[in-house]
Image (spheres, grey):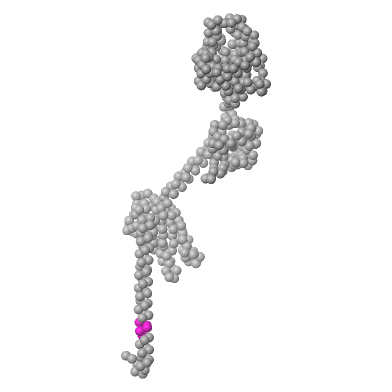
Amino acid sequence: MHDPSKTYQELLEDNASLKQRIKELEKSEAESKRAEEDLQKSEEKYRLLADKIPDIVFILNLDLQTTYVSPSVQTVLGFSQEERMQQTVNQQLTPASLSIVFDTFARELVLEKEGRIDPQRKITLELEYYHKDGSTCWTETIISAIRDDKRVLTAIHGVNRDITARKHAEEYLRQSEENYRSIFENAQEGIYRTTPEGRFTMANHAMARILGYDSPEELMDSMTDITHQLYVNPEERIKVIEQIRLHGFAKDVELQFYRKDGRTIWVYRTMRGIRDEKGQLLYYEGIVEDITDRKNSVHQLRKALGGTILAIASLVETRDPYTAGHQRRVADMSRAIATEMQLSNDQIDGLRMAGKIHDIGKVSVPAEILSMPKKLTDIEFSLIKAHAQSGYDILKDIEFPWPIAKIILEHHERMDGSGYPNGLTGDNLLIESRIMAVADVVASMASHRPYRPSLGLDAALDEITKCRGVLYDSEVVDACLHIFNEKGYKIID
């Protein structure tokens, strides 16, 4: 009913105001409805997203009960959503991870009460969950707070990402490092790492012991210039660094190092360079074995062998006085040629030893034939020629560290197959045999023989020059000519 005291105009104004209010209420109701619809759509989108991602999305109430968990819990942990929501947190986590969760939440609640916490704060933990099959699964868990309009904590939101593979890889790496460390510390060989400039950055106890230091720390502190403090021959480090630059490593190298007390030792060393992904050299690492005792034993053995070989050589020369000293001359010339050709030290030693007894087979030749002062008949010469095979037969069962028996067998063979006893050609002859063949010819022609006087050095060098590449190895002939013509080599008396 309207107020009778109001004028008609006032009634019209009241009616318009009422209509405006009704419109505003209708608009507010529509906006509220749209807001509800938008919220519902947002929740549906969130739920759809949570249901589809591979990570586990969950919500806990303040009693740590699961109120929501995404379907991915079954893929990751084997439990259905219903099974998961019925589990207590104690049933979900291993004891160690459960302790981490309780400690974290307790600390966060204290900060919450003291107002010292960022409402948007997120906490990341690595937690171990139980799988339905009895195994465990490691997850990276990100936890954040759900708050109401007054910023009061109402629930806990979390996301679990499966990191089991990564954790297993980390554990494998840790165990590998422990195993490496055990090997590193307990190895009898020295293991080390150095900078390109020449300082130790890592060494095990064996490395310190080999070099005479009390500890790896003392070694690393004391050795500031490896090239000159460690290497007896500093140029060897330069060579090995170049080898590593070309090939990436240097294997099976024997060299001499200085110990702390100044003594020298022999070591057997393998080393390689370590580079980054851009190919930049980071450091060198290597393994060292002390072979001093072994080298000394080998030296003593070779010294004894040398004495034995000299005794054998003397025996040959007593039966053939006209060739006295011939074997020594051949041995020395062979050594000089081999050195010029840059053969290894081991090859040179073997060649020198073989040269000293290369005519040992002549012990089977009658002495009167060896010293006969006239040209030999074919039959007599055939007996002489048999000395190469006889020498091989005498020595073949002796285990020399060099192929001495074979060198003696082949020293009268020729490159074109015209030699004896087996008519071998150059490709089938040891390089040591080819060297001795040239040295034997030069020494023989330049010396007096029972059946002729010395032909002279010039004639001997002319002989190997004419037959270069036919009877005698070209490289060997060139080396022989070079040591006589350029380096002034003299045949020893």
Magenta segment, principal secondary structure? helix
Q: Is residue 136 above or below residue 193?
A: below
Q: In this view, does 75 lie above or below 361?
A: below
* Residue 19 lies in the magenta stretch: yes
**Residue 438 sits in quarter:** top right
**Front residue of this view, candidates 128 and 436:** 436
Q: Is residue 140 above or below residue 25?
A: above
Quarter of the image that includes the N terminus:
bottom left
Residue 453 makes an appearance in the image: yes
**Front residue of this view, candidates 30 and 59:** 30
Quarter of the image that includes the C terminus:
top right
**Front residue of this view, candidates 295 and 437:** 437
What range of the chain is rendered magenta?
18-22
- Residue at 37% x, 66% y is 42
Residue 353: percent from left, percent from top: 58, 19
Residue reaching furthest to the bottom:
5
Residue 340: percent from left, percent from top: 61, 24
Residue 409: percent from left, percent from top: 53, 15
- Residue at 41% x, 56% y is 160
Query: So how many labels did they put on this image?
Result: 0
Residue 300 makes an appearance in the image: no
**Residue 218 sits in quarter:** top right
Residue 33: percent from left, percent from top: 35, 73
- Residue at 36% x, 77% y is 27
